Image (tube, rainbow, N blue to C red):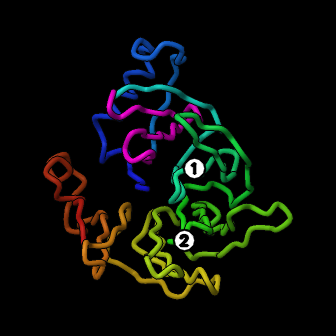
Amino acid sequence: MTQIRCFSLLPLCLVLFCTSFSGAETPGLATRRRRPVALVQVQQWQRLLVANRDSGSISVIDLPERRVIGETVVGTRLSDLTVSPRGDLVLATDEAEHRLLLLNYHDGKVTLRDRVPVGPSPVSVTLNSSGNLAVVASSWSHSLTLVRLPVDTSQVPQRISLPFAPRTQLALPDGRTLLVADAFGGRLGVVDLVDRRLRHVHDLPAHNLRGLALSSDRRHLLVTHQVLNPLARTTSNDVFWGLLMSNNIW
């Protein structure tokens, strides 16, 4: 299954945004402020699940018909969303309740299965390559919470402390390595999921690391980030023309 950020499917986000205010496109959906923050596709691109930050809900979009067909409130303030390889288990992070939400998806419907406590202020969730381990990044607690799937309520999830506030994650195909990006600075952590430890931290001359992806040959890491020019000034001209801060990809 594919996990997508909202900016990569902007037209669909705009459809959902308009629906959230008018309510005319899909009868029965309440008029509310949703603010989509994460998307995942299920049913071989027949359905799209959307995590709404402000409403704490998951919207279901019928992609062929391009319309919202349902919505379920599952939390308070959602921050991320991912789905298991089989597409039946959906994971969402609730930033306000400090929980990992385990959701069932079947036939266009989302139901809440369980809530797992994680580190304060969870901002992202990812799965390892085999889909049996969920990793939740919590920014303000500078930690990762490892949740074994299926969840055993008798066990306390393990945590890994980090020297920075994490946000974006990327699980590598080897099944044991996880890359974690600094939410504010330029640090990139390499985590060993088998030994449960932080292996190394790379310092990049950048900040606001927001995208991690492997190249098609899986030999190179692509990183989207910003760079602040120390020689530029905080004038309207330097800001307008991108001289003060630039958006880049490595």
- Circle 1 — which element? loop
**Amino acid on which the number 2 mark rests in the picture:** Ser
Rendering coords of residue 137 (x, y %): 57, 63
Q: Is residue 44 magenta?
A: yes
Residue density around tag 1, few if under 14, some if 14–19, many if 20 or more, within 10 Å: some
Residue drawn at 40 percent across, 81 percent down:
203
Give residue 7's quadrant in the image: top left
Rendering coords of residue 19 (x, y %): 41, 21
Q: Quadrant of the C terminus?
A: bottom left
Determine the CA span between mark 1 and mark 2. 15 Å
Residue drawn at 54 percent across, 48 percent down:
79
Give residue 153's quadrant in the image: bottom right
Rendering coords of residue 63 (x, y %): 35, 34
- Circle 2 — which element? loop
**Amino acid on which the number 1 mark rests in the picture:** Asp
Give residue 224's quadrant in the image: bottom left
- The answer to whether one can see residue 39 in this image is no
Q: Quadrant of the N terminus?
A: bottom left
In the picture, the disc for residue 183 is none
Task: Look at mark 1 in the image and give the residue it sits on.
Answer: 88
Residue density around tag 2, few if under 14, some if 14–19, many if 20 or more, within 10 Å: few
Q: Is residue 171 magenta?
A: no
Task: Look at mark 2 in the image and give the residue it sits on.
Answer: 130
- From the viewer's perspective, is residue 140 above or below residue 14? below
Q: Start and end of the magenta stretch?
A: 40-65
Residue drawn at 65 percent across, 64 percent down:
141
Rendering coords of residue 187 (x, y %): 43, 75
